[in-house]
Amino acid sequence: MSQVRTPVRPLGAISETFRADLDAAVTPEIEAQVTAFVDKALTPATRVIYLVGCGGSLFMFGAMRFLLERSPIPVVALNADEFMLRRPAALGPGSVVIASSTNGGTPETARAVRFAREAGAPVLLVTKDPDSLVAKEAEDVVLHRSVEAKQVLQGLIAYALLRAQGVAGDYDEALAVFRSCSEAFETSVRELDERLRDIAAACVDEPCVYVLGSGPLEGAAQTFAACYLQEMQTKHAVATGSGEFLHGAFEVVDGTVPVIVLLGEDATRPMGARAISFLERYNERNHVIDGASLSLPGVPAHLRATVGSFVMASCVTARLAQHFEAFSGRPLSERRYMWRVEY
C-alpha cells in the first residue's frame, strides 16, 4: 500500500529515448572501437588496470569492477585527484587506464587523463560529450547516451579486457544480452515504481538516511547517498557496505533509523541478507530493494546478477531519486556549490 502523502511537484518522466539510448550502447561499431583499444593497450607487459573518475563516475565503476575480478591483472579504482597525487609506481606503458566522466566536465579527471598519457599509459575515456573538457585530453574516447547506457558500455569494456586475457568464454552470449537488455531495464523501473515511491515518501523528511549495498552494488549505494541525496537533495545520507555495516554503523540503529538496502543476486548476496536479518530484529524502518524480484525479460539466469547490477546501479537509483524530488520539491538539477563557486 502506498504511503498517504502527496508529492509537491510532478514526478519526472522516463526519458522518451530511454530504450534507444540503451540499444545504442553496445553496437558492433562501439564493440569494434573498444576491441581495437584493448588490442593495442593490453600487452604481455601490462601489470595493472586503473579505473579513474570522481564522484558518481567513480562509484559507477562498481559493477564493472566486480566483473573484472576474473582478471588475472589486478584492477585498482581511484579518485582522479588521488590518482595524480599518489603517482602509482606501476603507472606507465605497463598499465591501462579506463577513465570516466559522465558529461566530460570534471577538471580533476581531465588532469588525470593528461597525467596518465604523459606517463605513457594507454587511456580509454568513457563519456557523453566528445567535445568536453575531459575528451579534449583523451586520444581514445567511447561515447554513451545515458547512465543506463554507461553501465552496459562498461560491461562491454570489462568483457573485452577479460577476453583479451583468455577468461571470457561467455563473451558472445554476454554481448548478445547486453545488446538486447533495454526491455529489462525499462520493465524493472515499472515493476519497482510503486515500491520506490513508498520508500521516498517514508524517507524524504528523515534527518538522515542510511544506504547499504555489497559487491557490485556498493558503488550504487554510494551513488545514491552521495550524488542523489547529498548532492542533489542536500540531504544527510550515509552509504555503507552491507558487510561493514555490522562492524560499526549498526550501533546507530535504535529501531527508527531509515535504512535502504540494495540487494543483488551476485555472490555477495549473503552479506546483504545478513544485514537485513539484523535490521528485521532491531529496526522498523527498513526498505529493501531486491534485484531477485525483477523479471529481467530476455536475461538468462546466469547473467541475471550482472544485468541486475547494471539496472540497480542506474535506472533504479535514478528513479528513486526522482521520487525523492517529487516529495521534497527540490529539483535534482539544483546545486548549492557545484558549478556555482570555485572549489
Image (cartoon, rainbow, N blue to C red):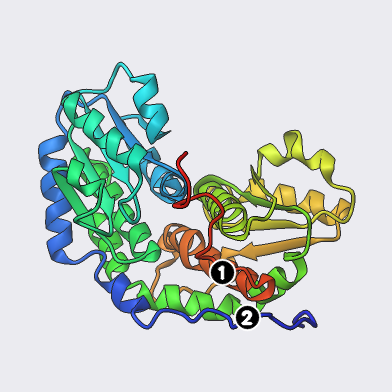
Q: Quadrant of residue 171?
A: bottom left
Helix, strand or loop for disc 1? loop
Q: Quadrant of residue 151?
A: bottom left
Q: Report the side of 144 relative to 264 (left or right).
A: left
2 and 1 marks in contact (CB < 8 Å): yes
Q: Which residue is mark 1?
A: 331
Callout 2: 10 Å neighbours few (<14), some, many (20+)?
some
- Three-letter residue code for mark 1: Pro
Residue at image point 18% right, 46% down: 136
Residue 112 place in picture, x, y as percent: 30, 33
Callout 1: 10 Å neighbours few (<14), some, many (20+)?
some
Q: Mark 2 to mark 1: distance in Å?
A: 9 Å
Residue at image point 17% right, 58% down: 31
- Three-letter residue code for mark 2: Arg
Residue at image point 29% right, 58% down: 153
Q: Which residue is mark 2?
A: 9
Farthest residue, direction front:
341
Compared with 294, 341 (above or below) is: above
Q: Report the side of 30 relative to 173 (left or right).
A: left
Asked whether 53 or 179 is in front, the reply is 53
Any mark on residue 77, and which? none
Helix, strand or loop for disc 2? loop
Residue 14 place in picture, x, y as percent: 46, 80
Residue 54 place in picture, x, y as percent: 42, 42
For the N terminus, the quadrant is: bottom right
Compared with 74, 103 (above or below) is: below
Residue 337 place in picture, x, y as percent: 53, 49
Looking at the image, can residue 94 be seen?
yes
Disc on the earlier residue, 2 or 1: 2
